[in-house]
Image (cartoon, grey):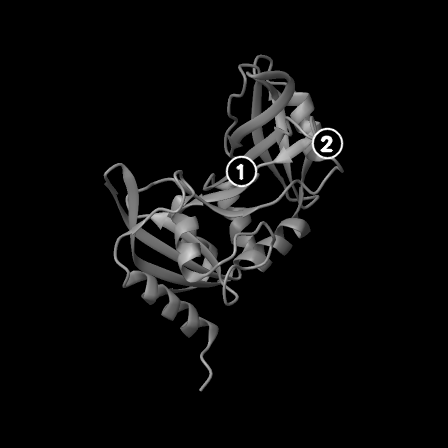
Amino acid sequence: MKKTNRERIIERFNQVKRLGWVKSHRANNTGIGKTFEDLVGVVENNNDEPDLFGFEIKAHREESSSYTTLFTKAPSFPRGANAYLKDKFGTPYPENPELNRLHTSMFATQSNTYAGKYAFKLINDKRNKQIRIAVFSLRSKKLLDDSVGYTYKALENVFKKKLNDLFYVRAERRNTNGKEEFHFTNADIYAEPSFKQFLKLLDKGKIMFDIRIGSYQSGTNIGKAHDHGSGFRIKAEDLPLLYKYRESV
């Protein structure tokens, strides 16, 4: 009898689990995800398709309280939004002051502080069905710009395409001779995500948006915007709130 996708991904997970402690394949915060994906045979990509057997794979350190990326996507409006934000509100690279970058995190419930002069905040415009990036003057509190953002439709499309079936893996972590190692021990299968719930969690401040825009510093694209993964993130403890169905493996 042909195995279902659920059975196939659980089988792959159990194969990795039986390996015990494995060395990280990458020396930074993304090492855990890269290591697990390599071990189950996922080819690294930046597209909107699920990773394996129709499942999007996320991995998380057991002891970590950091945010998990739900999905990354450049703003859907206006055209050239990344370059516009970077050039208007970004800060220069220390080593290349002629070029700008814009790295900051924000929520819908409160404004942040950026570069000592700006405050960024997400605006959930229910009337126009948009999530906009609002930039305020830190000193005067005046709105400077809210022309960049996402339509509900653009977000819902990637939300459901990328996260419709989620395989969420947790791992213990240790350091051996200065090298990070993981033991993948538990996993959850999530299904039937709710975009309405995504918007509710955004309004409650449980979803964070990160802007990660840089500039190409060499080559033919020098000076042009380089999106390093701007996207929406959530804490592991709140992930079940997005889904109707959850199964522990």
| Label ID, residue 209 | 1
Residue type of the residue flagged with mark 1: Phe
Residue type of the residue flagged with mark 2: Thr
Q: Name the residue furthest top.
A: 139
Discs 1/2, front = 2
Which residue is more in the foreground, 219 or 100?
219
Please indicate, yes or no, whether residue 18 appears anywhere in the rendered image. yes
Q: Which residue is mark 2?
A: 220
Q: In this rendering, would 193 be left or right of 142?
A: left
The residue tagged with tag 2: helix, strand or loop? loop
Which residue is more in the foreground, 175 or 79?
175
Where, by quadrant of the figure, is residue 248 drawn?
bottom left
Which residue is more in the foreground, 138 or 71?
71
Name which residue lies at 53% across and 14% down: 116
Please indicate, yes or no, whether residue 249 appears anywhere in the rendered image. no
Disc 1 to disc 2, C-alpha distance: 30 Å
Crowding near pointer 1: few (<14 within 10 Å), some, many (20+)? Answer: many
Q: Mark 2 and mark 1 in contact (Cβ < 8 Å)?
A: no
